[in-house]
Structure formats: C-alpha cells, structure tokens
C-alpha cells in the first residue's frame, strides 16, 4: 500500500551498538527498526524490562533519542505526563508549536499485559497522542523466564515447568489487542519483523495518528524460547506461516490482515523449533493446532473472507 | 494588593497551584484531599489556570504522570492522602533520586486497616524515608504559602528535589479560614519558572532513569543525601524572601517559651494549636512549659531543634502516627531522641501517641502529658521504664 | 578504591548526557563464531544489515567491483567490535554469501 520496501529503511541508526541484549535478540531487532521508523523527534518512556536494563547501563546508553525509564508498571502514565507537558509547553510558547514531537511508550509483555495494564488503559481512555509499543517475548525474560499473561499455551517457563502434573503453561495467551481495541482507539496493529515492510508501514501509520495507538510486536527470545540464536528470523517467519501469529491492523473499525497466508504450515513446525515446547506430546501439539485453527477461523470471520488458509500437510 | 478570602485548606492549596501557574496537574480522588483537585479542575475548566489536567486512573499513575511531565520541563502538581500516598510510595523514591522538582500536597489521613478517612500522620510519616523535602502546615494560610514556597525550593538549581506539603486532613483541609491569597504575578516573581533541571528534548537527547550497577548506585544516593542536606540554605532563603514578598514569616521550627522551660513539648501539625493553648495557660499559672512546632520535617532541622532542648529537664513528643514494633513507636519521637543523644542531652524524652484515626487531641491530654513530664524531672533516660504511652485510647 | 568519578563529579539523577554512548562498550568478546562476508557472492540485498540486532553490519558507500565484473555502489561489512556472532546474517543470506567461522583470538 505504501510501497515501502527493504530499500526504504533509513540508514541512520538511533539505537547504538554496545547494548547488552542477547545474541540474536528479537527485541533488539524490534527496537532498532521502530526507532528508524519513528525518527529522531520522539520522546520515549520505557517500562522496566530486558530491553530497558540492557540499553541503559550507566554511564552508557544505547539510545540516541530522549528516553526515560521510571518503573515497571507505569510507562503509559509517564508517557501521558510527557505528552501533557509537551502540549502545555507548546501552548505557553516554551516549545515551538510547530515542533513535531511524538511521545512513545515501550513495554514488554509483563509491563504491558500484566503489571502495566491499568496505566495503559488510563492512557488509552484519556486519548493521549501516544504510540504504545508492546514487544512481546511471551514471558518475564528479564527476571529469568517466568510466565506472564502473554505466555502461550503449553509453553515451558521457569514458573510453569513441565513435570508429572504440569505440562507447561495451561492458560491461553491474553488477547491484548482485543483489550486495547475495546478502548475505541483509532489504530492498533500487530507486527512481525520478518515482514519488514509491513512493520514499517504500520509503525509510521500509528505514529502519524494524533491519538492513542498501539502496536503489538512479536519478539522472539533466544534463551527464553530455547533455540539457537541464528534462528530468530526463521522462527518469526514460521510464526506467521503457521498462523500462530497473524499480522493485522484495526484502522478505525476496519479490520485487515496485512500478511495473508494462503496455505498454513502445521504449527508443529513452529513448536518443534523451540525448546520451550520440547516436552509436548503429539496430543498436546494437536491441542495447540486446534487452538490455532479456532483463532484463524475467528480472524477470517473478522476479515470477512479466508485470508489465512488451511493447514497444508506435507 | 492582597486579597483575603475565606478558604478551606484544600482550596487554599488549589489557589496556590493557580498562583504558581502550574503546567500539568495529575491527581486521583481520595478523601480528604479531593477538594484540591476539584478546585484545580474548576480553575482549568474556567480558563483561570492554563494547565493540562490528567484524570489518571490511580495515584501511582498520578505521580508517574507528573514525574514524566516534570522530566519534560513542566511545572507540576499532584495531591493525595493515605492509601493514595502509599500507592505513590514506589514512585516517590524514584522522583527524589531522579532529582525532579515535583510539588505535592498531602491532606494527612490515617492508613488502613481499619479503613478510616480522618486525620493522623501515618501517611505523611510513611513517606519520611523517600528523600523528599517535607513541610507540615498548621493552617490553611500556611498550606497556601508553603505550596508556593515549595516551587521556589524544589526548582532551585541548588536543590532539584521534590517537595511535599502536609496539612491535617479535615482539621485543616476542610476548615474554612480567612486566607490572604497570593497573586500570580507576585508568586511567579517570587518563584520564577526557570527550567534548570535535565529535561527530555529531541534537540538534546539524554537518557533518564538508567540502570546503575554497584559501581554507581551508591554515588547517586549520596548525591541525594548531600542535596537534601544542603537544601536547608535554600529553604531558609525561600522563607526569608517569602516574608519580604508577602509579609508572612515562616521558620523551619517555631518555638514558644523554650528558653527557660523545664518541660518542652514537641508537636507537628494542627495539634500544635491545642498544645500552645495549654502552654499559654500553664505559663500564666507559673509553670515553665515550652513548645516546639516542627514545620520542616525533612531535612530534619536537628541543630535548631537541639538549641531549644538544651536547657530542658524533660521533653515530651506528641506523635500522630505509630510504627508498631519499632524501638521508638512514634516517628517524630525517633528523630528527637537521636537529635538529643547526638548532643549528649541525657534527659527523659517521652513519647505520647495520640489522635490516631481522627480522634481529637484535647487540651486535657496535653495537661496530663505535662503532669507526667514533671514527675520525671531530675531523671535520666535510662531511669525511664516505659518511653511511650497512648493518650486518649480505651483500655 | 575504584578510579571511577565520585558523586560530586557525575550528573544528577543518573542521567546519561551522551546519546549512543554504549558504543564505548565493545561486545566482540561475546562472539564464538565470526561471520565472513564473501563480497563477490553478496548481492547487496540488505537483509543481513536489516536483521542484525546490534547493529553490527555496516552499509558503506564504498564501490565494489566483483570478480564477474558487476559494480556495486555499496559494500556491507561486519563491525567486529560489536558483532556478537549470533549468525542471523548468515542464516538469512539468500545467496549464502556469509559463512560463520570459528573465532580465533
């Protein structure tokens, strides 16, 4: 739609190397590109989490844009205050009214769907001109892989270990986009960097809207998901190809799948690539396949046509 | 030109916020503070105050939002009480070490459980270790004036520390008194809006709220201690200038008849009025009783306080809060005991916990406190069997 | 005692005034495998540069003429000061122009 291609990615790096994010970190790829997509005229409020601690170790910072971290649960509230200050200071002439400043909040899944949910809800409901970005690595990775409300069904984590009684996480992932959408925000979308043009198109669109917008970004985690670091992009692509992750946007009331998948791969291919699902029995894999099938049916219903096709077995 | 109008303590605080031309206000309703933000909302709604008003979903977010706004260069205000302050507690520590000049009003109230909306100092005292500068107002006029002084102190380039102004829930917050309202022009001249702290700005990107390893964390905590200690000079200047601008005089502590007093009472907040009424009666009756009122609680003005306790034979401290299970029980008492011990003043220092959860502090209580104090004259601290008592409670 | 600056000498509130100063911290030592780009095989598709999490692949305005005579305006090189050796670049390279070899120190 926008004609954005890999060649359009700006060269300037607003995230400096030397950060301590892990080898092959998916969240690092998310951060690097979201900064490129948003440009320099931003102020970022960041929730506590792995990206926060690995990029701001005193006396050095990886950030080349104004950035603040306050606590775990309040990135959306801090961003709200920053946005209000920018507005007030523009009105009083302390900041030039023409100056474009986009306020951005960033949080991981714990900081967003669990402990930060209340502050996020307040921010969305008050209608601030803020883009909130959730980088979702599906557990509390900073503290060592504990389950969060965004941990997927049957995933091993250190607090949902696979044992004789427990089989990993037994609850389904929280539908954060649904929760955000219920606030009536003008724009919300999911992104996966394996589809980089889609990623940029949505980030730009979300940042240009004057109002609260939300981006749910897929962020594979090497130690938490237990795979070899070179596979980060492979796994990200598999997530979309198997339909366990769907790239879509909700622009006003219009729902659109932005990365259609005509023939899905069996979800087993995604699961078997990661150690966090290594304990699964064939039956459990089938349960997850059934869950994905249901989710895909729901997506197709929202889309009004079959945009995510059936599983094609080899 | 000054204008005296009848105002409650809460409204007096709101008028101060208006006079200070605050840019961003974020607050959440809680009794007895609510009327402050109602009034501020009214000012904004009527165009009398040009501020962004954030209807946040909790006190945690209220302080977080004003912290963010302060970091972006705005003059900010929030207010709360009791549970609300406890919800802010995490962010209070961050605000002080981040060195952001936030100003907050605290209409003091008892902490649950049981839930109780009435006055005591449990909330204010719970915040005493957060690194904020803390002032306690005696009445609506003081609440008004100290909020204005708070901006001058907090935003001073030598300070950059948040300031909390306490005033007693209901007793001050809801009592209407004549208040000499400061005009904006004069308030801004006294406390000019100049952003000298680090701010978030795309023209000059910086990172705030970094992670400090054991190699660095300690240094930032020491910075805070040093800054709050040396803020004394700025606070004193701010009070001196306040008198010059507005004619009203404030000191870190108020002393009454302490020069030749055998028994010195120490009190904070609205109860000071009751204590003073008794002290004056006692003086007329020939009893050598004195009184110290603590206005500046953090940084604790121990040198000045000690000066007034040097000649006393017994000191009795009234606390409107308690720290169950500690060696001191009353929090103000602990500061007084340490102050005296450090100077080798070995006389009995007794703690009286009173007025919890909105129970009235009666003049007759003060009378019994003084009577008890006289019974200890000539003793040393180690001679005292029980250092604290509860006054006005049923056995 | 450490030779790091004392509390009087550092900015208030743990603020970091120099943006992007993490470049001072070299992450090269994290690397076990080292990517080598074969400039003749490389088709300048930008994928390795795009997916580097550091970023440690540099896109330089440096002309390169391949053995087959093809002229490229840009050259991709690895910044070995920061490359952690994750191998995403080699894995994602569509023409297998990047090989991961053992790091010898």
Image: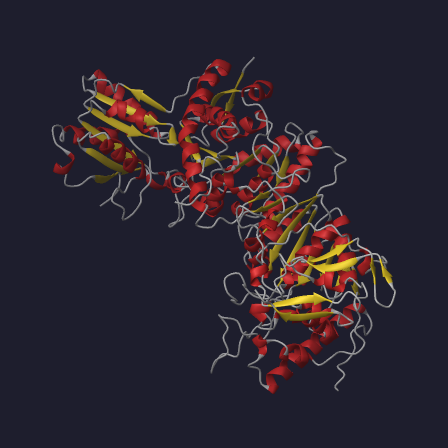
Q: Give the image location of residue A45, x and y in percent.
A: 61, 48
Q: Can residue A214 be seen in this snapshot?
A: no
Quarter of the picture holding the C terminus of chain A: bottom right
Q: Does residue A157 appear left or right of residue B352 in this picture?
A: right
Total marks placed: 0
Q: Toward the viewer: B302 or A31?
A: A31
Q: Give the image location of residue B361, x and y in percent.
A: 31, 33
Q: Toward the viewer: A105 or B33?
A: A105
Q: Toward the viewer: A27 or B330?
A: A27
Above or below: residue C102 compared with residue B149: below
Q: Give the image location of residue B271, x and y in percent.
A: 34, 30
Above or below: residue A26 compared with residue B192: below
Above or below: residue B194 compared with residue A37: above
Q: Does residue A119 appear left or right of residue A10 in this picture?
A: left
Q: Give the image location of residue A250, x and y in percent.
A: 76, 60
Above or below: residue B181 compared with residue B66: above
Q: Does residue A301 appear left or right of residue A138 in this picture?
A: right
Q: Toward the viewer: B315 or A82?
A: A82
- Residue extending furthest toward the front: C67
Residue at 67% over, 33% down: A89
Type of colouring: secondary structure
Quarter of the picture holding the N terminus of chain A: bottom right
Q: Which picture quadrant has residue B82?
A: top left
Q: Which picture quadrant has residue B223?
A: top left
Q: Can residue B179 be seen in this snapshot?
A: yes
């Amino acid at each position: 739609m926008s004609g954005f291609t890999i060649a359009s990615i700006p060269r300037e790096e607003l995230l400096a190397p030397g950060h301590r994010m892990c080898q092959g970190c998916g969240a690092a790829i998310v951060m690097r590109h979201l900064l490129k997509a948003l440009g320099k005229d931003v102020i970022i409020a960041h929730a506590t989490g792995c990206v926060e601690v690995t990029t701001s170790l005193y006396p050095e910072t990886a950030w080349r844009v104004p950035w603040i971290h306050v606590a775990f649960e309040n990135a959306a509230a801090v961003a709200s205050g920053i946005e209000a200050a920018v507005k007030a200071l523009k009105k009083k002439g302390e900041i030039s009214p023409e100056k474009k400043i986009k306020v951005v909040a960033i949080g991981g899944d714990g900081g967003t769907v669990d402990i930060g949910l209340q502050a996020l809800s307040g921010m969305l409901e008050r209608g601030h001109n803020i883009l909130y970005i959730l980088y979702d690595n599906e557990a509390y990775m900073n503290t060592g892989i504990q389950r969060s409300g965004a941990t997927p069904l049957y995933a091993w984590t250190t607090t949902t270990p696979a044992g004789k009684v427990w089989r990993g996480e037994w609850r389904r992932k929280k539908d954060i986009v649904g929760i955000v959408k219920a606030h009536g925000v003008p724009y919300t979308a999911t992104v996966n960097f394996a589809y980089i043009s889609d990623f940029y198109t949505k980030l730009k669109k979300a940042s240009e809207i004057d109002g609260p917008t939300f981006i749910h970004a897929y962020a594979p985690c090497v130690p938490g998901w237990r795979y070899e670091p070179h596979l980060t992009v492979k796994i990200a692509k598999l997530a979309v190809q198997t339909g366990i992750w769907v790239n879509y946007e909700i622009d006003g009331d219009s729902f659109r799948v932005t990365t259609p998948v005509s023939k899905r791969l069996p979800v087993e291919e995604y699961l078997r690539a990661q150690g966090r699902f290594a304990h699964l029995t064939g039956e459990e894999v089938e349960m997850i396949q059934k869950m994905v099938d249901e989710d895909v049916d729901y997506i197709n219903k929202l889309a009004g046509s079959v945009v995510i096709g059936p599983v094609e077995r080899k | 030109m000054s204008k005296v109008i009848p105002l409650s303590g809460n409204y007096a605080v709101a008028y101060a916020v208006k006079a200070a031309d605050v840019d961003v206000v974020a607050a959440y309703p809680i009794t007895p503070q609510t009327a402050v933000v109602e009034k501020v909302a009214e000012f904004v709604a009527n165009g009398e105050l040009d501020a962004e008003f954030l209807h946040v979903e909790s006190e945690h977010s209220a302080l977080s939002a004003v912290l963010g706004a302060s970091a972006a260069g705005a003059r900010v205000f929030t207010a709360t009480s009791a549970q609300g302050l406890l919800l802010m507690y995490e962010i209070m520590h961050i605000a002080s070490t981040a060195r952001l000049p936030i100003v907050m009003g605290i209409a003091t109230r008892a902490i649950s459980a049981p839930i109780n909306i009435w006055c005591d100092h449990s909330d204010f005292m719970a915040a005493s270790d957060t690194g904020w500068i803390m002032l306690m107002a005696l009445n609506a006029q003081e609440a008004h004036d100290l909020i204005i002084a708070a901006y001058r102190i907090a935003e001073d380039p030598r300070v950059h520390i948040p300031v909390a102004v306490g005033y007693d829930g209901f007793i001050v917050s809801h009592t209407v008194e004549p208040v000499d309202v400061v005009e904006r022009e004069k308030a801004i001249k006294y406390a000019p809006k100049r952003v000298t702290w680090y701010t978030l700005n795309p023209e000059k990107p910086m990172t705030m709220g970094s992670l400090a390893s054991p190699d660095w964390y300690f240094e930032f905590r020491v910075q805070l201690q040093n800054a709050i200690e040396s803020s004394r000079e700025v606070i004193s200047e701010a009070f001196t200038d306040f008198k010059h601008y507005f004619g009203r005089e404030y000191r870190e502590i108020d002393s009454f008849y302490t020069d030749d007093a055998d028994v010195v009472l120490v009190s904070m907040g609205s109860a000071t009025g009751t204590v003073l009424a008794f002290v004056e009666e006692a003086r007329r009756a020939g009893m050598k009783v004195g009184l110290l009122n603590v206005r500046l609680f953090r940084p604790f003005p121990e040198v000045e306080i000690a000066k007034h306790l040097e000649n006393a034979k017994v000191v009795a401290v009234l606390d409107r809060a308690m720290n169950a299970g500690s060696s001191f029980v009353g929090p103000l008492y602990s500061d007084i005991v340490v102050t005296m011990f450090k100077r080798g003043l070995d006389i009995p220092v007794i703690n009286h916990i009173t007025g919890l959860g909105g129970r009235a502090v009666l003049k007759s209580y003060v009378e019994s406190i003084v009577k008890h104090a006289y019974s200890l004259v000539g003793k040393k601290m180690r001679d005292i069997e029980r250092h604290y008592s509860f006054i006005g409670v049923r056995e | 005692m450490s030779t790091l600056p004392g509390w009087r000498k550092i900015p208030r509130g743990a603020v970091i005034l120099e943006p992007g100063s993490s470049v001072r911290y070299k992450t090269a030592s994290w690397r076990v495998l080292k990517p080598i780009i074969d400039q003749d095989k490389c088709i300048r598709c930008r994928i390795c540069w795009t997916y580097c999490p550091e970023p440690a692949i540099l896109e330089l305005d440096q002309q390169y003429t391949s053995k087959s005579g093809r002229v490229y305006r840009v050259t991709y090189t690895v910044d070995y000061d920061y490359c952690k050796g994750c191998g995403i670049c080699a894995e994602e390279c569509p023409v297998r122009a990047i090989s991961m070899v053992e790091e010898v120190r």
